[in-house]
Image (spheres, helix red, strand yellow):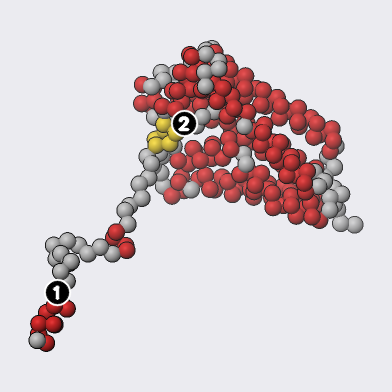
Amino acid sequence: MHKMLHSMESEDPFEDDDQPRITWHNSRKPIEVDERQELGEDVYSLIFVAPIYGRTFLFALYVVFLKLMLFSLLALDLYRKSQGNFSDKDNLTRITQFFLIPVAVAMQEDLMAVYARLANVKYDQDILEISPYATPSKFALSFLLRFVDGLYSLILNFILLLITDEVLNLLLNFAALGFLQSIDDVAFSVVANGYLGDKMESRAELVRDISLPRRRGDSFTNALDSILFFSTCSVMFGIYVFVLVKSNPVD
């Protein structure tokens, strides 16, 4: 009787000796990494896929020009109001400014997109089969315009942060700049929904059909987006400290 009980305890009727035992570690499925990345739905992608001198390309350039012009008008107004005076701020405002610096950098969607794509994606000649106008030079042009847009927006955001006197106004100004930064996305939506004609709508569909292959590089290349982000934050912090010391000299 004792031997029978011992044999029943040692045998598991649900255990199959031919199958590997499932544990917490080997039961998890490997994480699948998407090998391609979407182009992005904005006017910079339209510049990439549309033919030069076509309506879509010219409209996208107009939107970029409009956005930069609005930023420039804002810059002139900021200069007129500040006259280079960044002093006379209370401690609460200074603390808020300090902690909003990385937020100001992260809010620049176009700049962050450039950083991410430099590190993670590359141009693919197969894209020419979808759009013969999506050449490497157009790819570089769209990157350049996106970078100029994001950097210009960051500079204005930083100046606006420095000259604002109250915490509430700081947050309201950030919201206003967020509206200006989304103009290119709104313009793409207008094109994609067919408000400017079927031909331009087809160009927006091409943007949705195109994806970029993932870059396979070393650890430095893969971490380049993080390096660029933290480097930009460090530069902004350095400029902030310099302006703070310069505008409040110690007697």
Q: Measuring 48% from the left and 41% from the top, which residue is drawn there?
A: 119
Q: Which residue corresponds to mark 1?
A: 11
**Which is nearer the eye, 213 or 241?**
213
User: Is 73 positioned to the left or the right of 19 in the image?
Assistant: right
**Do we see residue 6 in this rendering?**
yes
Looking at the rendered image, the quarter that the C terminus falls into is bottom right
Q: Measuring 72% from the left and 47% from the top, which residue is drawn there?
A: 239
Question: For the residue carrying disc 2, how many other residues have a C-alpha within 10 Å: few (<14), some (14-19), or many (20+)?
Answer: some
**Would you place residue 96 above or below residue 42 in this image?**
below
**Which is nearer the eye, 135 or 106?**
106
**Do we see residue 144 in this rendering?**
no
Q: Position of residue 136 (x, y in %)?
A: 45, 25
Q: Position of residue 116 (x, y in %)?
A: 51, 40
Please identify, in this view, whether the residue under mark 1 or under mark 2 is nearer the observer: 1
Direction right: furthest residue: 251
- Tally of numbered discs: 2
Q: Position of residue 153 (x, y in %)?
A: 67, 35
User: Is 32 positioned to the left or the right of 111 in the image?
Assistant: left
Mark 1 or mark 2: name the one nearer the start of the chain. 1
Q: Looking at the rendering, which quadrant does residue 122 occupy?
A: top left
Q: Measuring 13% from the left and 82% from the top, which residue is drawn there?
A: 5
Residue 39 got which mark? 2
Q: Position of residue 25 (x, y in %)?
A: 32, 62
**Which is nearer the eye, 11 or 138?**
11
**Would you place residue 90 above or below residue 221 in this image?**
below
Question: Amino acid under label 2?
Answer: Leu
Q: Measuring 53% from the left and 48% from the top, which residue is drawn there?
A: 226
Direction front: furthest residue: 1
Element type at mark 1:
loop
